[in-house]
Amino acid sequence: MSLKDKEKWNAKYESSACLAGREPVPWLADHAGLLSGQGMALDIAMGEGRNALFAASLGYDVLGVDISDVGIARAESLGRENKLTIRTQVADLDHYSIEDDSYDLILCFYFLNRHLFEGIRKGLRPGGVLMYETFTVDYLQYSGFRREWVLEKNELLEAFPGLSVLDYREVDEAENETAYASLVARKE
C-alpha cells in the first residue's frame, strides 16, 4: 500500500456517510453463532469499522487496522455512538505483521494481500476463528479490478493449511455484478 492508497481510501470515506453501511457483512452476522465473544479480535482492512464494531458487540476486545485515518476516525465515532470501544491502528498493510498466537478471531473482508495469509494463520490462537470474504476471479467480468486483486478458484479454501474449514462458498451473482469467496475456519 502507499500514500496513494491512503489518499484514495480517505477520499472515498470522506465522500460518503458510510461507504459500506453500518451493518456487518452478512457472512459474519450469519456465522456469529460460531463465535465465543471472548478474547482478542483483529479486523484487517477495517474501513469504517462495521465488522469490528459487530465483533466488539459480541464481547471481543477488537483491534481494527486500516490504511485510512478517515475510515478509522469514522469507526471510532460509530463506536462512541453505539457505546462500543475498539482499539485502532493506522497501518500500511503491505508491511503489517500479525503477532503469533494473539487472536481468538481474525476478520478480513474485501481486502486481499496474500503476504498476510501466513501471519493470519499463525496469529490465531488454538480454537481461534478466521472469517474471510473477498472478490474472486469471476468478479473481473463486472469490474475494472486487476487479476492480482482477486482470488483464483478455490484459492481461499486452500490458503490456510492447518485450519479446519467450517464453512466455505464461492458465489457469482450476475444480477448484482459481484463474485466472491467466503470462508470460516478454526485453528485446532
Image: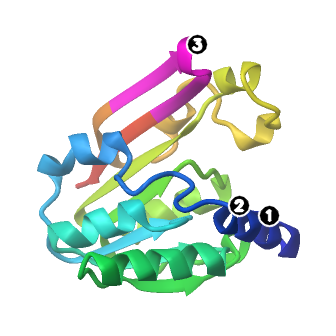
The N terminus sits in image quarter: bottom right
Residue drawn at x 23%, y 65% is 126
- The residue identified by callout 1 is 8
Dots 3, 1 in contact, CB < 8 A: no
- The residue identified by callout 2 is 12
Q: Main secondary structure of the magenta part?
A: strand
Secondary-structure class at tag 3: helix
Quadrant for residue 178, please give it: top right
Query: Where is 91 relative to 7, above or below?
Result: below
Q: Earlier in the sequence, mark 2 or mark 3?
A: 2
Quadrant for residue 107, please give it: bottom left
Q: How many marks?
A: 3
Mark 3 and mark 1: span between their CA atoms?
27 Å
Q: Residues within 10 Å of mark 3 (few under 14, many from 20)?
A: few
Most foreground residue, 180 or 79 = 79
Quadrant for residue 12, please give it: bottom right
Indicate the amino acid at tag 3: Ala
Q: Residue 176 colored magenta?
A: yes
Magenta region: 168-181
Q: Which mark is residue 70?
A: none
Residue drawn at x 44%, y 67% is 49
